[in-house]
Amino acid sequence: VTAEIETRVDRKLAWQVLSDYGRWSEFVPDLQVSRVISQPGEPIRLEQRGRIPWLPNFPLVMITQVKETPPKSIQFLRVAGNVRSFMGEWQILGKTPVRLLYRSLIDPGFALPPEVSIEIFRHDAKVRLEAMAGEMARRAAAGSKPD
């Protein structure tokens, strides 16, 4: 899955939102939990729990290891969970404004026709990108208001 979106924010703000893992569940639809579970100084590990709207009885649970290259990219790799394989990256392209690029390679490991699985994860990528861009715009607007 590959998707991208234009934003009206600078690279610094885009990085702040992308790397604010503990708050993702506040603005990414269907993501119920997003938290760092690694200790300071260790490689970053995230626990994420969510749901797939088309599969209401299948909660999505994933632990990913994250590699940050500030302020350009975040790579992720599934290390545990109920998805067989999941890896990819977020990239911040440009300086002001930036484009967000999301790429992932997914093997869900559950019994669905491949074309259905692809559509589910394409839709998820679109929703995540729009949520990230929306949060970036919200934070930019909040930062430009006088106190």
Image: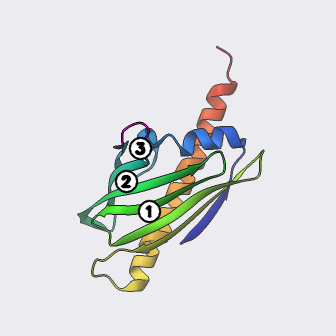
Residue drawn at (44%, 48%), measured in percent from left and top?
43
Q: Residues within 10 Å of mark 2 (few under 14, many from 20)?
A: some
Q: CA distance from mark 2 to mark 1?
A: 20 Å
In the image, which disc is placed on residue 42?
3
In the depicted structure, whether residue 138 falls above or below residue 146:
below
> Which corner quadrant of the image does residue 21 belong to?
top left
Q: CA distance from mark 3 to mark 1?
A: 15 Å
| Horizontal arrangement in the rendering, residue 104 relative to residue 39 (left or right) | right
In the depicted structure, whether residue 105 falls above or below residue 143:
below
In the depicted structure, whether residue 94 falls above or below residue 121:
above
Which span is picked out in magenta?
Answer: 37-41
Residue type, numbered disc 3: Glu
The answer to which of 52 and 90 lies nearer the viewer is 90
Where does residue 35 sit, x and y in percent of width and height? 37, 43
Secondary structure of the residue carrying tag 3 is: loop
Residue position for label 1: 77
Residue position for label 2: 30
Residue type, numbered disc 2: Asp
User: Which quadrant does the C terminus fall into?
Assistant: top right
Secondary structure of the residue carrying tag 1 is: strand
Q: Residue furthest top?
A: 147
